[in-house]
Image: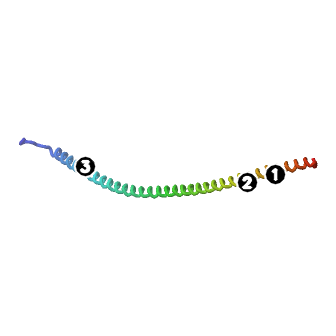
Amino acid sequence: MENLKLPIALVLAMAAQLAGGVWWVSQQAATIASLEESVQQFASKMAVEDSVNLKRDVRDNTDYIDGAFAEIEELWDETDELWTELDSLVVTIGAITKLQQRVAVIENDLKYITRDHNGMLDMKGGMQ
């Protein structure tokens, strides 16, 4: 190996390839570092967006639940009004029934009074 003669062109070509390889690897490292930084920024941005979205969703759901409770309260009040009206209706029907019973008793009394009165006139030789 004492007389190893290498052409200068070969040595220069290998040096150029070695330099190109080093340059390519350093470019890849820089690209990877840039991408890592971008990923970290996106992750941070996503965390902030998730927090904002969560707060918005909680607020919207709270508003929806409050609205639902308000509707339930209104329905409950309307139900109370219906029960009050039903109680009033029952009392009114009871009063009407009592009046009908009293009218029926009076009608029967009048029927018997009229019959007795007509019968007395018949016995006395009154008008027929």
- Whole-number angstrom distance, CA of label 1 to CA of label 3: 124 Å
- The residue under label 1 is which amino acid type? Leu
The residue positioned 24% from the left and 51% from the top of the image is: 26
In percent of width and height, residue 95 lies at 70, 55
- The residue under label 3 is which amino acid type? Trp
On screen, residue 81 versus residue 127, left or right, reads left
Can you tell which mark lies on residue 24? 3
Q: Residues within 10 Å of mark 1 (few under 14, many from 20)?
A: few
Q: In this view, does 7 lie above or below 83?
A: above
Can you tell which mark lies on residue 99? 2
Determine the secondary structure under disc 3. Answer: helix
Is the C-beta separation of discs 3 and 2 under 8 Å? no
Q: Residues within 10 Å of mark 3 (few under 14, many from 20)?
A: few
- Whole-number angstrom distance, CA of label 1 to CA of label 2: 16 Å
Determine the secondary structure under disc 1. Answer: helix
In depth, the one of 30 and 23 nearer the eye is 30
Residue carrying label 1: 110
In percent of width and height, residue 112 lies at 82, 49
Q: Earlier in the sequence, mark 1 or mark 2?
A: 2
Q: Earlier in the sequence, mark 1 or mark 3?
A: 3
On screen, residue 58 versus residue 18, left or right, reads right
- The residue under label 2 is which amino acid type? Leu
Q: Residues within 10 Å of mark 2 (few under 14, many from 20)?
A: few
Between marks 1 and 2 in the image, the one whose residue lies nearer the viewer: 1
Please identify the quadrant where the N terminus is shown: top left
Between marks 1 and 3 in the image, the one whose residue lies nearer the viewer: 1
The residue positioned 39% from the left and 57% from the top of the image is: 51
On screen, residue 47 versus residue 60, left or right, reads left
